[in-house]
Image (cartoon, grey):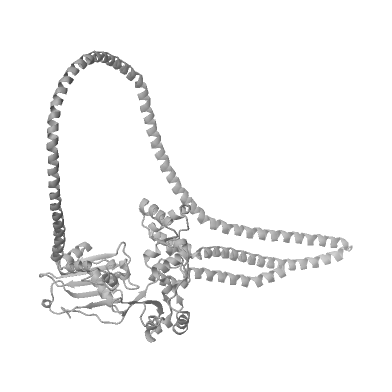
């Protein structure tokens, strides 16, 4: 039960309730009024509580450093999770913040409620920050496990600023004011020195101006004399100009008459120009209408092509049925010819018999035998036709299923199509690169997720868990020129986001393993280790080198259920952390294991300060982007149906053989 509210300071967390959040299905706990310590083994949910507090108080997933998608925090096989946080109030009103996360909802799938009333995330963040002074985005007040590396990288100045923000916003504002005043003081000192230099410069300029003043006075006297001479000259020019002006006036009148006549000649041309403009406008409008009709025809054409593809399989099936009918018709024609030959032979034999009575008796006997034989032949023929029809039907069905199975087994194409349906920017970028490969000097690979071919489902799951999404969505180039060209064409000109990794010449360097061959063989024989993660995928050398450079794929181990047992009981993590150089210093490690149908990722890091090993255990979720293009269950259904058809063919073979012998 919670303590009395008087014992808490305003802004303290008094109650937390979680439902279907990560490993917690339905739990409610009450933090104490003082220091609270959460103790538990690795993977039991300690960090999950901090995640719940951050998200419940309006934080975004990127503050935690675990994932960008909020829906990943919903428990496995659940569609909705809830976080409820009760804060100790400043005054009388208690604030209960509830955040609901819906996997099936569009967008972020998140809804906030304050005391039962639906509010926005911005409203919750403002309440938490302004009213309760809780800074969930400040690493000095809220330090998630995955952000420790960022915090340790702060400079002393950055650490001071974040500490001031955590203690008091006023302290941080005063600090900024001091920095501004210090900068202004330095500017003022510089201005004083500059003004003194300016004064000295102005005094020197003043002396120079005094000397120039005397020269200007003498110059003005000369200018007065020149002015008088110019006035005299002006009167002379005026007389000349008056004569010229009279002539210009006459020329102007003539020009006006000529301009008026030119306007009269231009009027018909202007009318024709207006008519042509109107025709051009009508043509443009007609062109727009035709363009619209072309688009409609294109859409109609696409629908017809879709129907064509649908009917193509039916046409192939009908063609096989026609071939089967032709085969039956040919066999029937041969039977008619055979019977005709028999009749001819019987007629010849009939002519050799001289006695009519004997012939009649022989004929009657032969007719009876023929009727019996004909009955057997008819029955055999019907059985054979039925068997042939059934065999043709099974053959046609088998070919159809084989074509479908072949399409399904093109796993990489199916996976690429599924990824591009959910990632339109990735699709547009790929289409541009694929259509303009001649622009690049060397091959361009990517996106990486579409070039990887996992050997099995577990390999796909482990790679997607270990490699960041930004790396999986990246493109790999092999030279600086292609890097600059791709970034300029896609990001700058087309305003599409793109991640680019450069692997010089696309060359795969010699892989340096963490463990010796001897130690690796021991891992495989004693602890069930299957190998390194890079050995479980196929991809171009340039892509593999990019994954090694950015995700250390060559250092990650993959195990099975025996590996999990060694991790729990035989100290495998200690063995993985031992360096083989004899220095006795620990080393970081990463390994995947399996237990009871679930997979886990064990990651150990060595502290730069204390040298101690910190372990993190993550549940491994099923792959999404690297999942098989078509579920294996659908392929198994087709394979099973093909096996059944083959069995039916084998069952028909003895029946067909017996019918052929009788026939």
Image-based side of 317 in relation to 131, left or right = right
Q: Would you place residue 204 above or below residue 448 in this image?
A: above
**Which sits in the foreground, 440 or 458?**
440
The location of residue 544, given as percent across then percent down, is 45, 67
Count of all numbered marks drawn on residues in the image: 0
Q: Quadrant of residue 660?
A: bottom right
**Which sits in the foreground, 167 or 582?**
582
The location of residue 655, given as percent across then percent down, is 66, 71
Q: Quadrant of the N terminus?
A: bottom left
Q: Would you place residue 296 above or below residue 46 in this image?
A: above
Q: Quadrant of residue 426?
A: bottom left
Q: Quadrant of the C terminus?
A: bottom right
Image-based side of 94 in relation to 330, left or right = left
Q: Would you place residue 249 above or below residue 326 in this image?
A: above
- Whether residue 120 is visible to the viewer of this picture, yes or no, is no
The location of residue 238, given as percent across then percent down, is 20, 16
Q: Residue furthest right?
A: 354
Residue at the spot 80% in from the left edge and 66% down from the top edge: 366
Q: Residue furthest bottom?
A: 569
**Which sits in the foreground, 378 or 128?**
128
Q: Quadrant of residue 3?
A: bottom left
Q: Would you place residue 318 above or below residue 590 in this image?
A: above
- Whether residue 411 is visible to the viewer of this picture, yes or no, is yes
The location of residue 521, given as percent across then percent down, is 48, 81
Image-based side of 366 in relation to 100, left or right = right
């Amino acid at each position: 039960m919670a303590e009395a509210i008087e014992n808490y300071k305003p802004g303290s967390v008094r109650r937390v309730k979680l439902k279907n959040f990560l490993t917690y299905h339905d739990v409610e706990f009450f933090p104490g009024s003082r220091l609270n310590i959460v103790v538990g083994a690795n993977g039991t949910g300690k960090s999950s509580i901090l995640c719940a507090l951050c998200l419940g108080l309006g934080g975004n997933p990127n503050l935690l450093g675990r994932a960008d998608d909020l829906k990943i925090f919903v428990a496995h096989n659940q569609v909705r999770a809830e976080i409820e946080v009760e804060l100790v109030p400043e005054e009388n009103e208690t604030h209960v913040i509830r955040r609901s996360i819906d996997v099936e909802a569009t967008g972020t799938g998140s809804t906030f409620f304050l005391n039962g009333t639906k509010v926005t995330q911005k409203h919750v963040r403002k309440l938490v920050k302004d009213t309760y002074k809780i800074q969930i985005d400040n690493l000095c007040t809220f330090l998630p496990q995955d952000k420790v590396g960022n915090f340790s990288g702060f400079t002393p100045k950055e650490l001071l600023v974040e500490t001031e923000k955590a203690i008091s916003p006023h302290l941080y504002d005063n600090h900024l004011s001091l920095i501004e005043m210090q900068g202004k003081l330095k500017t003022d000192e510089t201005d004083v020195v500059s003004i003194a230099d300016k004064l000295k410069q102005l005094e020197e300029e003043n002396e120079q101006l005094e000397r120039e003043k005397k020269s200007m006075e003498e110059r003005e006297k000369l200018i007065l004399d020149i002015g008088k001479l110019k006035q005299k000259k002006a009167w002379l020019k005026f007389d000349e100009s008056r004569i010229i002006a009279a002539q210009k006036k006459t020329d102007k009148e003539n020009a006006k008459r000529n301009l008026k006549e030119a306007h009269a000649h231009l009027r018909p041309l202007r009318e024709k120009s207006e008519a042509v403009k109107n025709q051009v406008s009508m043509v443009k409008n007609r062109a727009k209408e035709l363009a619209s009709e072309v688009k409609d025809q294109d859409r109609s054409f696409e629908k017809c092509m879709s129907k064509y593809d649908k009917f193509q399989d039916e046409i192939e099936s009908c063609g096989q049925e026609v071939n089967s009918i032709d085969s039956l018709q040919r066999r029937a024609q041969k039977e008619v010819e055979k019977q005709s030959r028999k009749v001819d032979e019987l007629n010849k034999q009939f002519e050799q018999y001289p006695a009519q009575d004997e012939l009649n008796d022989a004929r009657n006997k032969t007719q009876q035998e023929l009727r019996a034989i004909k009955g057997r032949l008819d029955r055999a023929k019907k059985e054979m036709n039925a068997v042939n029809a059934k065999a043709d039907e099974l053959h046609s069905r088998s070919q159809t299923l084989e074509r479908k199975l072949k399409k399904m087994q093109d796993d990489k194409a199916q996976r690429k199509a599924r990824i591009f349906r959910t990632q339109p920017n990735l699709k547009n970028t790929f289409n541009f690169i694929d259509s303009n490969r001649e622009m690049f000097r060397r091959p361009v690979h990517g996106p990486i997720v579409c070039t990887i071919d996992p050997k099995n489902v577990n390999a796909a799951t482990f790679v997607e868990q270990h490699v960041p999404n930004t790396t999986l969505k990246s493109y790999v180039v092999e030279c600086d020129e292609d890097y600059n060209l791709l970034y300029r064409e896609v990001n700058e000109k087309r305003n599409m986001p793109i991640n680019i990794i450069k692997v010089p010449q696309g060359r795969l360097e010699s892989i340096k393993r963490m463990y010796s061959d001897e130690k690796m063989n021991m891992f495989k024989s004693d602890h069930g280790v299957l190998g390194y993660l890079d050995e479980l995928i196929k991809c171009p050398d340039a892509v593999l080198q990019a994954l090694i450079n950015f995700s250390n794929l060559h250092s990650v181990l993959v195990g099975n259920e025996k590996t999990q047992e060694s991790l729990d009981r035989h100290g495998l993590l200690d063995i993985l952390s031992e360096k083989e150089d004899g220095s006795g210093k620990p080393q970081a490690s990463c390994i995947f294991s399996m237990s009871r149908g679930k997979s886990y990722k064990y990651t150990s890091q060595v502290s730069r300060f204390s040298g101690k090993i910190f372990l993190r255990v993550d549940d491994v979720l099923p792959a999404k982007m690297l999942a098989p293009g078509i579920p294996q269950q659908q392929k198994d259904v087709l394979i099973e149906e093909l096996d059944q058809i083959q069995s039916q063919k084998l069952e028909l073979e003895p029946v067909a053989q017996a019918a052929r012998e009788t026939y």
